Image: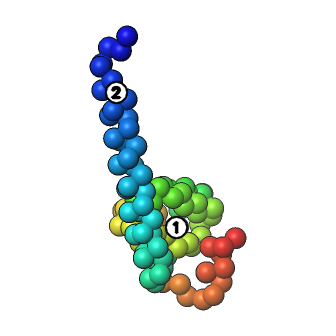
Amino acid sequence: MSCCGGRRRQFLSETQQHEEADGRQAQSHLSSSTNSTPIYFEYSGLTALTVQGPISRRRYRFAEPGARMSVDRRDAPSLAAVPQLKRVKPTMAADIEMELE
């Protein structure tokens, strides 16, 4: 016998539907944001740093001081709040290649 009268099952079903809709919206935002100019950050700390973007949920791994990588535009404002990360412009093709490795 169910103690909640099936409300838990109904709630979980509704939650799953909302998550699926949100996932489709995030995917469409991602495709439009990836077509624009990338945003780059450079790490100035002493060791390595991994941060997670609050919007894309992507993990950004800066393996060493001076490491540069592009980030999702939606994550850029919160990454800019990290003291050891500085927004930079790509200076040469090598910066873009570093991201692919």
Whether residue 91 sits left or right of residue 30 in the image: it is right
**Do tag 2 and tag 1 residues touch (Cβ < 8 Å)?**
no
Neighbour tally class for label 2: few under 14, some 14-19, many 20 plus, Cα within 10 Å: few
Position of the C terminus, as image quadrant, is bottom right
Near-viewer residue (86 or 10): 10
Q: What residue type is labelled 2?
A: Arg
Q: Is mark 2 on a helix, strand or loop?
A: helix
Determine the CA span between mark 2 and mark 1. Answer: 48 Å
Q: Is mark 1 on a helix, strand or loop?
A: loop
Mark 2 vs 1, N-terminal side = 2
Q: Where is residue 36 in the image (x, y as percent from the top left)?
A: 44, 82
Which residue is drawn at the image coordinates 56% and 73% (left, top)?
Answer: 68
**Residue 83 visible (yes or no):** no
Near-viewer residue (80 or 22): 22
Near-viewer residue (62 or 100): 100
Q: What residue type is labelled 1?
A: Ser
Q: How is the image coloured?
A: rainbow
**Residue 72 visible (yes or no):** yes
Which residue is drawn at the image coordinates 58% and 60% (left, top)?
Answer: 61
Which residue is drawn at the image coordinates 42% and 61% (left, top)?
Answer: 24
Determine which quarter of the picture holds residue 79.
bottom left
Neighbour tally class for label 1: few under 14, some 14-19, many 20 plus, Cα within 10 Å: some
Q: Which residue does the numbered mark 2 point to in the structure image?
A: 8
Q: Where is residue 14 in the image (x, y as percent from the top left)?
A: 33, 41
Whether residue 89 sits left or right of residue 100 in the image: it is left
Position of 62 relative to 33 (above/below) = above
Near-viewer residue (62 or 31): 31
Which residue is drawn at the image coordinates 42% and 76% (left, top)?
Answer: 32
Q: Which residue does the numbered mark 1 point to in the structure image?
A: 44
2 vs 1, front mark = 2
Q: Position of residue 99 (x, y in %)?
A: 62, 73
Position of 86 relative to 16 (above/below) = below
